[in-house]
Image: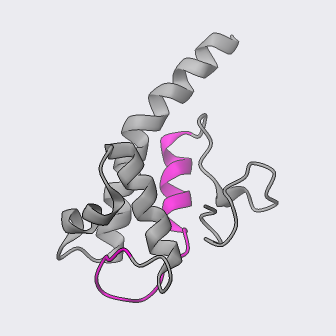
Amino acid sequence: MSLVNASNKMSKSDKQIRSCINLVDDPETIRLKIKRAKTDSHGQITYDPEERPEVANLLRIYSALEGIPVQSSPELFEGDNMFSFKEKLTNKLIDKVCPIGERALDLCQ
């Protein structure tokens, strides 16, 4: 789902460029997009798609990258605040997505 509005799908055709992670995004772009991703002001990281759709969206992304059930992912962030959670998600995205983008760019040259 969109990083700007979790009720919309993540789409490269969205007018807001920061709404999605592209495979060819560089690490700094990914870092900025996740840092600015919409969340809420609750203190804990919990998976509640109805009450906290934006946090649930970020947890789904993390879970997909890790290959774990999304319901168990909040346990990994117990005691973390939103900043710390977003940093961990950012690092995971950079580790998993950037090599794909780099390879894609290499193939285009």
Mark count: 0
Q: Residue at x 17, y 76 (%)?
A: 79
In the displayed structure, 107 sits above or below 36; it is: above
Q: Quadrant of residue 107?
A: top right
| Percent of width and height locating residue 44 | 28, 82
Q: Is residue 46 left or right of residue 53?
A: left
| Percent of width and height locating residue 2 | 64, 63
Question: Is residue 4 shown in magenta?
Answer: no
| Percent of width and height locating residue 42 | 37, 89
Q: Residue at x 75, y 62 (%)?
A: 16
Q: Residue at x 47, y 81 (%)?
A: 52
Q: Residue at x 45, y 54 (%)?
A: 61
| Percent of width and height locating residue 93 | 42, 45
Q: Is residue 18 left or right of residue 96?
A: right
In the displayed structure, 89 sits above or below 86; it is: above
Q: Quadrant of residue 8?
A: bottom right
Q: Quadrant of residue 3?
A: bottom right
Q: Is residue 71 left or right of residue 19?
A: left
In the rendered view of the protein, which quadrant contains the C terminus? top right
What's the image's color scheme? one colour
Magenta extent: 26-47
Question: Is residue 41 shown in magenta?
Answer: yes
